[in-house]
Image: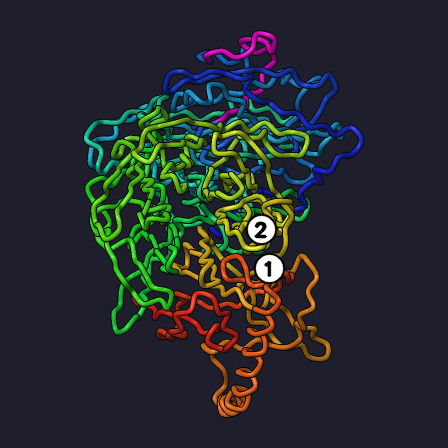
Amino acid sequence: MLVKLGVFTLASAQSVLPTQGDSVMDLRMKNVSVHKDDQYICTSYRMPVNESFIVQFKPLANANTAHHILLFGCSEPYNTEEEGAWNCRMICRGEEQILFAWARNAPELVLPKDVGFKVGGASKVKYIVVQIHYAKALPSFRPTDQSGIRLYMTQKRQRYEAGIFLLLAYSLTIPPNTPKTSADISCSFTASGNIYPFGFRAHSHSLGRVITGYHVNQSNDYHMIGKGNPQWPQSFYPVTEKITVKPGDKLVGRCTYNSTGRQRNTLIGPTAADEMCNFYIMYYKEVGTQIPFPQCVGNNVPSLIANLPPGSDEPLPYNATLEAAAHGHGSHMQGHEDPNTSTDTVDKPTDSSKPGLQHYVNFQSDFMSDKSQTSSSVNGLDYPIGQVGGVATDDKGGVYVFHRGNRVWDSRSFNFANVFQQQNSPIEQETIIMYNKDSNILRKFGKNIFYMPHGITVDQNFNIWVTDVGLHQVMRFAPGSEQPNLTLGVKFQPGSDNIHFCKPTDVAVLSTGEFFVSDGYCNSRIMKFTSNGTLIKIFGNGLMTQQADGYPPESSFDIPHSLTVAEDKGLLCVADRENGRIQCFDFNGNFQKQIHPAEFGPRLFAIEYCPLHDGLLFAVNGPPLDNSQTTVQGFIVDINSGTLSESWNTQDGLKNPHDVAVDPHNLRVYVGELNPSKVWRFDMMGDSGSIVTDRPKSTPGNPGTTSVSKVTESTTDTSEPIVAKGTQKEDTVLPAVIIGVLLVIPVVIIVIVVVVVRVYKNGKYNCCGRHRSYSRKKFNLGDLLSSHRGFDRLSTDESDHDIDLSDSDQEEYTITQKA
């Protein structure tokens, strides 16, 4: 199945732009409080008086809060809108029908043209009840919730009516430590006319591995409606085969589970510790077609199970993009596309006159990795590099890479309670690698300590701080030590009180020794500690309500993913990842400003401060989860005004950046990517310490392109190519290049001498060894850990101040590919 997730649309999808009679309605929980695990809470909304059709559903929730959301259509709810929320053992008074289902960070859904769910008016759906399963109680710092679904509706009558037919198993015992157990569903289809499936959705809990649904016609031919992995985003995936379900036909489903590692029996039930077996079929039908009972419950025609096609219980191929998206890392995902996915729209109408489904997926993740290993070949020493969780620099220009070895973050890594599932297997590789400024390995350690590395920081005293989202811990290592001298958080125990973290993401340290922790994936908060680890204060929340500017309120986070301190400004700044913005606070947690230029797009992954030019923030975004055409790239932001100075990129474009670090002494910026596992080095060049990268020479009819997207004007002539010393050129060009370089060297030396003399006379040499009086221009790109060639040494010049204008600033560090 080819998928490209972000927004589910359908062939000839209807416009959701406002037109006369169109409306938008948010169905949210009304500030409900959830104090216990596994609570089912309902609230109701009255539908419009005039007949309307729902044509799009947009989730206003994330999987860290809501286990799943269901929308039920009722003629009368069990409780009315005015009575608020209730524990929903009962949903409707009388008949109810399912309209929509959401779980695991599924994207929004746009129905096909001419198809809609009829509500209000003379329809049976006078109310919609929103049901949310809260697998975990809400944390104390975010005591209420407003998750829900946004409806896009039109009063224009649709040619076809949409509906959902549910296949479910209600009785099953899954034994412990069993790799394959199945539950089967079968029944005859009863209706007054045909239905035409166009979407399907698979739902189970943590043990489910594959759910398959079939249509069986009266000739006993089996046609697959869909095959889904319930650990992926639980959306309505497209039915790619033309299927017509007629009265008297049969419907068959199978759910398959893997309980390896679980030491108890598991039953079908309502809690997150139980299992479920649901296969949803979204269909359209002619107006007036009646379906008396739109559910298939249990195995009513056992003979059909014996003839299930081979492979019905075999899992789908691994898909890192969807694995990541389900956990909101997608909850990490950006940039690199899964090779099994397509960026092209899949347009497969079931008939030229019938609606069909298009399916997009734009998710990417920090735990998205291919299975291969890459290694850096340094002075004859090969060492494997996995997904890069974090990258940092110290005051001597050292570079620290925190990587995951052979570990990948996927659906098996954590259960619904955010407990890590591989507690007996720490990463066997050395996970922290330290390089000098010339990228020679100085030290490596971390073997058999970490489980899921994430962020890394080096403070002014050369202490190394790391976060491990599997351990739910923060650690500090003294210089030269291989064991932490400070550990915060309870090993393998997620939580939201004063002594627990839940997947912490980053650390920022003040010169006083006080430090901040972004407790990011579950808790959406920032915690401040004394130098010895005593908690000072907590601030931040996970509110998702939108303000007039389209962003949540100040101090609200949707994954605080990266921290940096601008101590000279008195600011702590946070990369609010899924809100696509930077929020800055004083050191007491009081909100000061937010920065969100449109170029960031919907997701911002990492930030780093440097006092260059009176204060700059370097940032990297990530691939969008929606269909927006956001470019994945790096940015320079003026911290004082919040304006975007410029953007920068690699020649082929960053794929999945996860962290950024700045070396102000050697005028370098580093970006760590998850997949492919790589660290890029960008050299700040020229009078201003600006960023330069390779670009092709323009020719007649081709103005040339540059990987630097300039926000401000520059006088640099972009038509001239900058040739990196490590780039591969045709052999016939090399002699000319060598001769040209030899001829130019004397001129370059003279120019350098003149520039240095003029600079020092004018007194313009200032912050971080840079010139302050010139406009920023470009980055010079070098690949620290790229993936094709051997290791090329950079210049060994030890000066922390001279700006080297020679070709050596454009050499590449590369690594060879290992199987």
Q: Residue at x 31, y 45 (%)?
A: 452
Residue 180 appearing in the image:
no
What residue type is disc 2 on? Asp
Magenta stretch holds residue 269: no
Q: Residue at x 26, y 51 (%)?
A: 479
**Seen in the image, is 526 located left or right of residue 686?**
left
Q: Secondary structure at mark 2?
A: helix
Residue 816 appearing in the image:
yes
Q: Earlier in the sequence, mark 1 or mark 2?
A: 2
Magenta stretch holds residue 82: yes
State the mark number for residue 740.
Answer: none
Position of residue 709 relative to residue 308, above or below, is: below
- Disc 2 target residue: 614
State the mark number for residue 772.
Answer: 1
Q: Residue at x 62, y 67 (%)?
A: 762
Position of residue 682 relative to residue 242, above or below, is: below
The single residue placed furthest to the front in the displayed view is 761
Q: Secondary structure at mark 1?
A: loop
**Seen in the image, is 69 located left or right of residue 775?**
left
Position of residue 125 relative to residue 799, above or below, is: above
Query: Where does residue 310 sit, x and y in percent of width and height?
Result: 34, 48
Query: Where does residue 541 sit, x and y in percent of width and height?
Result: 49, 27
Query: Which span is picked out in magenta?
Result: 69-87
Question: Are there few (<14), some (14-19), or many (20+) residues within 10 Å of tag 1?
Answer: some
Q: Nearer the viewer, residue 708 or 308?
A: 708
What residue type is disc 1 on? Arg
Q: Nearer the viewer, residue 620 or 772?
A: 772
